[in-house]
Image: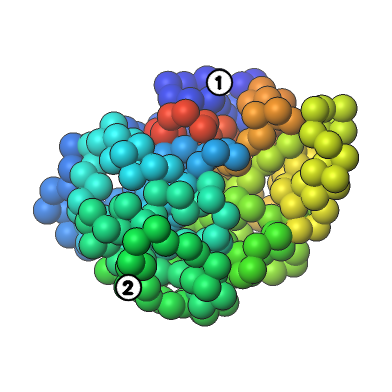
């Protein structure tokens, strides 16, 4: 069965899980909860017009991508009880505007650390003076507070696109939101994740019959394009280790997908491997997801 809960498109596939593993809304701001604080995750919004995911512990507050205006980032963080001026860092996956459009103003207003790969940094443009950038190398790991962040290369039509594995206290989050196909490396990096944020961009039939010109359809379908619902379902049914208790479907196309279709395909794949206590969330372009605690 499918059980719905509060929040944007939140459901469980199969039988509802035990009460001991649950999602929660966040407390107002952080309190002195120290090194054992929960790893908290919220996708502030995801889609063709903007992407950003917030991750926090007792020691670090990090934004992965800044694809909304600074004002929208401020408002969406405020909606989950967070102050944008307390961000410790912004980490950028690639240079496309739906991942960086708010970066310049956010950095200028807050002085937040900006981490980016060298090739991506060379593709970023600035209306005013560029902020100080900290450079990471794709495939390497770095730390922000008590968060260990590993980057991995993904296949997308950007200069040096990466996904992220975020670890803290034995818990793991993985983010892969712009990729044309699931390489062996991507599958490897998603292993042992407690929560996965994974692109589910388009329904193949909707894309093929939809309004996009043929050259754009070819780009989306290419190995440097975007991941389809069918590719996500194949991963979940054939290559997933069934460890994650939450799968967030991200970067849905407005024209070539529908939340109900993406949910149905993902839940069908999860049900086929009897991962009955895994929940599926479809991230919205318009609103943040619930805040998940690991």
Task: Provide the secondary structure element on which disc 2 rests.
Answer: loop
Q: Is residue 56 visible?
A: no
How many residues crowd around disc 2 within 10 Å: few (fewer than 14), some, or many (20 or more)? few
- In depth, the one of 12 and 166 nearer the eye is 166
Q: Percent from the top left, x then y, of residue 28?
A: 18, 37
Q: State the image coordinates of residue 109 (x, y, percent, origin top left).
A: 23, 54
Residue drawn at x 60%, y 51% is 177
Any mark on residue 3, and which? 1
Determine whether 204 is above or below 232 in the image: above
- Left or right: residue 11 versus residue 31 is right
| Viewport quadrant of the N terminus | top right
Q: Earlier in the sequence, mark 1 or mark 2?
A: 1
C-alpha distance separating marks 1 and 2: 47 Å
The answer to whether 82 is drawn above or below residue 209 in the figure is below
Residue 132 tag number: 2
Q: Residue 258 carries which label?
A: none
């Amino acid at each position: 069965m499918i059980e719905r809960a509060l929040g944007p498109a939140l459901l469980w596939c199969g039988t509802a899980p035990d009460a001991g593993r649950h999602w929660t809304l966040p407390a107002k701001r952080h309190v002195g909860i120290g090194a054992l604080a929960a790893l908290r995750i919220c996708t502030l919004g995801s889609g063709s017009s903007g992407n950003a995911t917030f991750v926090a512990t007792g020691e670090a507050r990090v934004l992965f991508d800044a694809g909304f205006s600074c004002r929208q980032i401020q408002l969406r963080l405020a909606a989950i009880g967070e102050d944008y001026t307390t961000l410790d860092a912004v980490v950028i996956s690639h240079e496309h505007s739906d991942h960086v459009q708010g970066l310049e103003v956010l950095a200028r207003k807050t002085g937040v650390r900006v981490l980016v790969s060298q090739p991506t940094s060379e593709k970023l443009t600035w209306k005013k003076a560029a902020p100080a950038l900290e450079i990471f190398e794709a495939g390497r790991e770095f730390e922000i507070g008590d968060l260990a962040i590993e980057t991995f290369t993904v296949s997308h039509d950007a200069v040096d696109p990466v996904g992220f594995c975020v670890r803290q206290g034995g818990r793991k989050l993985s983010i892969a939101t712009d990729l044309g196909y699931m390489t062996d490396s991507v599958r490897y990096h998603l292993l042992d994740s407690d929560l996965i944020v994974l692109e589910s961009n388009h329904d193949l039939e909707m894309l093929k019959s939809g309004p996009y010109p043929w050259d754009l359809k070819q780009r989306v379908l290419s190995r440097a394009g975007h991941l389809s619902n069918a590719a996500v379902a194949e991963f979940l049914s054939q290559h997933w280790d069934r460890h994650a208790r939450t799968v967030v479907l991200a970067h849905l196309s407005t024209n070539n997908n529908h939340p109900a279709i993406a949910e149905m395909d993902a839940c069908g794949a999860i049900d086929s491997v009897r991962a009955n206590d895994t929940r599926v969330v479809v991230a919205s372009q318009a609103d943040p997801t619930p805040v998940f605690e690991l």
